[in-house]
Structure formats: C-alpha cells, structure tokens
Image (spheres, helix red, strand yellow):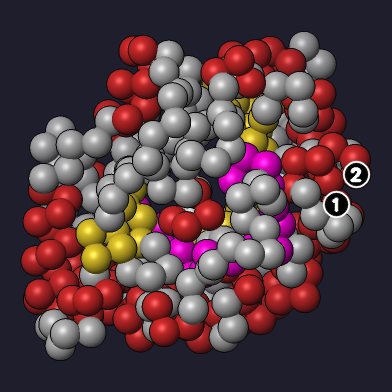
Amino acid sequence: MTGLDVGVRDTRGRVLRDLRISVTDRCNFRCVYCMPRAEFGPDHSFLNASRLLSFEEIDRVARAAATIGIRKVRLTGGEPLLRAGITTLIERLSSIENIDLAMTTNGSLLAAHAEELVAAGLRRVTVSLDSTDPDTFARMSDTRVPVQTVLDGIDAAVRAGMSPVKVNVVVRRGVNDGSILAVAERFRGTDVVVRFIEYMDVGATNRWELAQVVDVESIVDTIGRSHPLERVDAEYDGEVAVRYRYLDGSGEIGVIGSVSEPFCGTCTRARLSADGKVFTCLFSSTGTDLRALLRSGASQDDLVARLSALWLRRDDRYSELRAGTNDGAVRDRIEMSYIGG
C-alpha cells in the first residue's frame, strides 16, 4: 500500500500528502513573476512578528497533518532563510516520524547556512534560479545579488550532503526563454536536477498573459535538439514534474506544465501561510485560519479535525478550468510570496 492509498481524500478522491509551510512573507529578491517591486516596495506592509506562527505552532500543525497522511513537508517563504532561528524549526520538523522534509530557497544565503541546515536535519533543497546569465538573472529576480552567489549556494548544498538538490526555472517568453539550454547544460552531468516551470498566473500583481507562457513541449524540444531526451516514469503517483532523462546517461530534467498540462486531478498539496492560514490551492483567494484555533487553547485532536474537515470538502481545480477557457484574467488570488510556490 502506497502513501496515496492512506489518508483523507477530498471530493475528487485526492489524498492529502504534501504540506508547504511558509515561514515568512519577506524576501530579499523581487522576482517579477512573484514579488514585483512596484507592488512590494519600501511602503509594503509585511507581517509583523506577532502575526507569524511560532515554531511551536508550526510544529503542532505539521504533526496534526502527519496524523492524517502528510508525508512531505516543504519550508518556503518569501525566503525561508530570512526567518531567524530557522534551524530550530528544522530540528523540530525533522523529528516527525515518516516525514520527508525539504526547503525551497532563492539560494542567496544558502552557501553560508548549508552545513548547519544539514546538521539540523534538512536533507533536500530546491533552489530558484531562472537564468545563469548575469543580466537575465538580474532582470528576472530584480536583485543586486549576483547569480554566482546562488550558484555557490547550490554547490555548497551538494558538498554538505543534501540530496537531491533541485533547481527550479520559471520560464517567461521574451525574458529568460533564451536561457533554457544554458541552464540545462550548466547542471547536465551532475546530480542536480533542473525543473523548468511554465510561467503561471499566481496572484494578481504579476500582470500574467498567456502569450508569455513557453509550454513544456517547447522547453523539452529546445533542450532535446542539442541533447536527446526520453520521457521516464514518474517516481511516485501525483508527481507534478514530468521527468526526462538524457539518452547519454548524463542526468535528467523535469518540466512542470501547470498551464498547458494541468495536474489538478492528482494534486495532493496544501499550503500553510506564515500567519497560519491553510490554502488548498495555489490559486486560492481565501484560506482557513488555524492561528486563532491554535491560540485559543485547541488540542491536537481539534487541529486534526479542522484539517480533515477542510480537506474533505476541497474541490479546487483552477488550472483545469483555466485551460478550458484560456482565461488568466486577474482575480482576487493570494500572492505566491505569501503562501510559497
């Protein structure tokens, strides 16, 4: 019996297996598809410390989720390494039985912290890196942090023993689509797995247009013309990335086609915001508040019951509906920087 055979199922039969936990809404990058500077400038009001879930509260939610089937927990942000004392949280979460713990980071602080993260119990990391070209990287991330700093962070994670180390590349037509092959070649022949992600209409501030999407078929073709690829089976049911391996044995890549090839039907993810709201879809507009429950003296059984009830009534399938209309019109959707990717 696999992990997908056990646990709470939503109205469409999808099991709750993955929990993404945002530990902060702050970030030191201003990526144009996630946190555009025009909307997240000096006057933007970020969450103050009292509104953030404490590490103890996060730990309680994660343990409740593990009770009803969660097997993967990923720490996100904002930028999770900006949260002071993050290794304390990692130590807590890594002690939960049968939980695979990972982190997604922009990599800017990874070189300085990789060894202590591993010592605390982190085994896997995914680094956002939209180009290896300095100018294109700067254009996509809108930061003064040089791309070499992120590359050094990736190397440090590998040396520290994290495995697998993955790289996420959001591809936006006319901005970094010319970097696809270069990024693939930078990590080809290593154990680092690059995953190319279609530019999505997450949130309401990135001015998404369908014409800016480079579909996964085009991405695979761009790489395959220079380095032949073949599709391989998923590692587990519900895997969002479609995997391809190089025919010469020099590794693999993944592509994530939320726009052109929606995977709502197998989505097993819930997201916990830094201030304690649970969202059952990346494209949600509202979440369910757990912070008030946590701070009202609720028991673990109360948390388990709330999470179970939330998932049991879940009916989200935004990307499938968008695919049917080609409609990316701006709606009141929560921002990616608030709940993580």
- What is the number of the mark on residue 163? none
Left or right of 269? Residue 85 is right
Taking the image as shown, residue 25 lies to the left or right of residue 35, namely left
Find disc 2 in the rendering and name its residue: 134
Residue 31 shown in magenta: yes
Question: Residue at point 48% right, 39% down?
Answer: 204
Snapshot quadrant of residue 153: bottom right
Mark number, residue 147: 1
Which span is picked out in magenta?
A: 18-34
Disc 2 secondary structure class: helix
Secondary structure at badge 1 equals: helix
Residue 81 lies in quadrant: bottom right
Q: Is residue 102 above or below residue 336?
A: below
Apparent side of residue 199 relative to residue 140 in the rendered image (left or right): left
Q: Nearer the viewer, residue 37 or 74?
A: 37
Q: Main secondary structure of the magenta part?
A: loop
Instruction: Say which amino acid is labelled 1.
Output: Val
| Residue that appears at 28% across and 30% down | 317
Whether residue 51 is in magenta: the answer is no
User: Can the viewer see residue 195 in this picture?
Assistant: no
Q: Earlier in the sequence, mark 2 or mark 1?
A: 2
* Point 57% across, 86% down: residue: 85
Q: Is residue 295 above or below residue 169?
A: below
* Total labels drawn: 2
Front residue of this view, candidates 142 and 252 = 142
Residue 5: x and y in percent read 18, 45
Q: In the rendered view, tell whether residue 297 sits above or below residue 63.
A: below
Query: Residue 273: horizontal and vertical position, in percent?
Result: 39, 63
Q: Residue at x 43, y 14 (%)?
A: 326
Mark 2 near mark 1, Cβ–Cβ under 8 Å? yes
Residue 31 shows in the view: yes
Q: Amino acid at mark 2?
A: Pro
